[in-house]
Amino acid sequence: MMTTERETQSNRRFQLTRRATLSGGVLTLAAAQLSSPWGLPETSAAEDITTDDRARSLKVGLITDLHYADKAPVGSRHYRETLGKLDEAAKQFEQQNVDLVVELGDLIDAASSVDDELRYLETINRKYSAIADDRHYVLGNHCVDTLTKDEFLGSVGQEKSYKSFDRGGIHFVILDACFRSDGTPYGRRNFKWTDANVSAEELQWLQADLNANAKPVIVFAHQRLDVSNSHGVKNNADVRTILESSGNVAAVFQGHSHANDLNEINGIHYCTLVAMVEGSGEQNNGYSVLEIDPKGELRLSGFRKQTDRHWTA
Ligand SMILES: [Zn+2]
């Protein structure tokens, strides 16, 4: 297990230019490095990093848009089947010995009462919690349809809706775009799902957080930071400006629009993951393992409906 806070701060900046090529239907992203990108520090006497640790990739299990609810399917959304689909993902994550897991929002779907919703959340979170102690939650609009943010976070045991943490030389950022344009946090159907925003306070926090960091950065969000349609965060240009100015952000992983997608904007990859809730049967499942190689490779192994992605720093 690679552990946190072992690395000394590296002053190297993470600056990449990238190009995308399509070969055999597989999109490959290549990056030409301008300076040492991954910045995993050289071994120094002050460090306690073994050769094994340094050689090992960090593995992150990723799931999104589970929409679990004990209710009949609506259209292509098979709410109850999420339980079995998550079991399959959990097995794969266990086999691959992932270091941490992140769910990218919409863990639950709306219930007719707060009590029912808390039961749905408890049911799905029991399975999610069993996968790894090191697990993280991105708030999705459906998470706070029936519940307040405090109720959701309290129930899953996560202190804050946006935060950052370091693992194995990588700085991970979790964003919360569940704010209305006027800054009001989403909760109990007080919002329109198309009015997704990162709050002014959160933008300030993000800027300060990235200013204080010199490690390569991976960002997780629910609503999309790369599009200006109804699935996009309304002020995502402001978010992107902060991410770009840090010079260290390698990729953003997001959900919300339920289909595979990948965009590259000013050197940052925005990878949208497929929703677990879509479609009936195991063949319609979707989840992935993100492998971050210390030498600078990002490899997303997609299962079922999730597309593989790969780029090299
Ligand atoms: Zn969703």
Image (cartoon, rainbow, N blue to C red):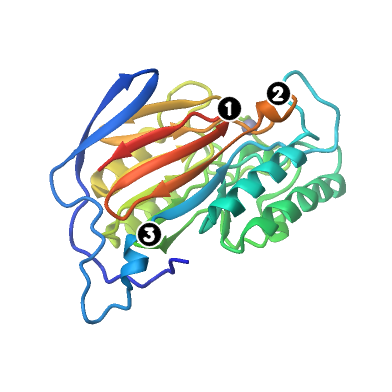
Mark 2 belongs to which amino acid? Gly
Percent x, y of residue 81: 78, 34
**Mark 3 to mark 1: distance in Å?**
27 Å
Residue beneath the point at 63% across and 37% down? 141
Neighbour tally class for label 2: few under 14, some 14-19, many 20 plus, Cα within 10 Å: some
Going by the image, does 153 lie left or right of 228? right
Regarding ligand 1, which quadrant of the image does it lie in? top right
For the C terminus, give its image quadrant. Answer: top left
Can residue 66 be seen from the camera position used here? yes
Residue 50 appears in which quarter of the rendering?
A: bottom left
Secondary structure found at label 1: loop
Q: Going by the picture, which residue comes out furthest to the left?
A: 34
Circles 2 and 1 in contact, beta carbons < 8 Å:
yes
Mark 3 residue's CB less than 8 Å from ligand 1: no
Neighbour tally class for label 1: few under 14, some 14-19, many 20 plus, Cα within 10 Å: many
Percent x, y of residue 144: 68, 43
**Mark 2 to mark 3: distance in Å?**
35 Å
Circles 3 and 1 in contact, beta carbons < 8 Å:
no
Residue nearer the viewer, 10 or 197? 10
As drawn, the label of residue 56 is: 3
Q: Earlier in the sequence, mark 2 or mark 3?
A: 3
Secondary structure found at label 2: loop
Going by the image, does 155 lie left or right of 267? right
Secondary structure found at label 3: loop
Q: Which residue is the site of mark 1?
A: 305
Mark 1 residue's CB less than 8 Å from ligand 1: no
As drawn, the label of residue 279 is: 2
Instruction: Please name which of the two marks, 2 or 3, marks the residue nearer to the observer.
Output: 3
Residue nearer the viewer, 223 or 300? 300
Mark 3 belongs to which amino acid? Arg
Q: Earlier in the sequence, mark 3 or mark 1?
A: 3
Going by the image, does 22 lie left or right of 117? left
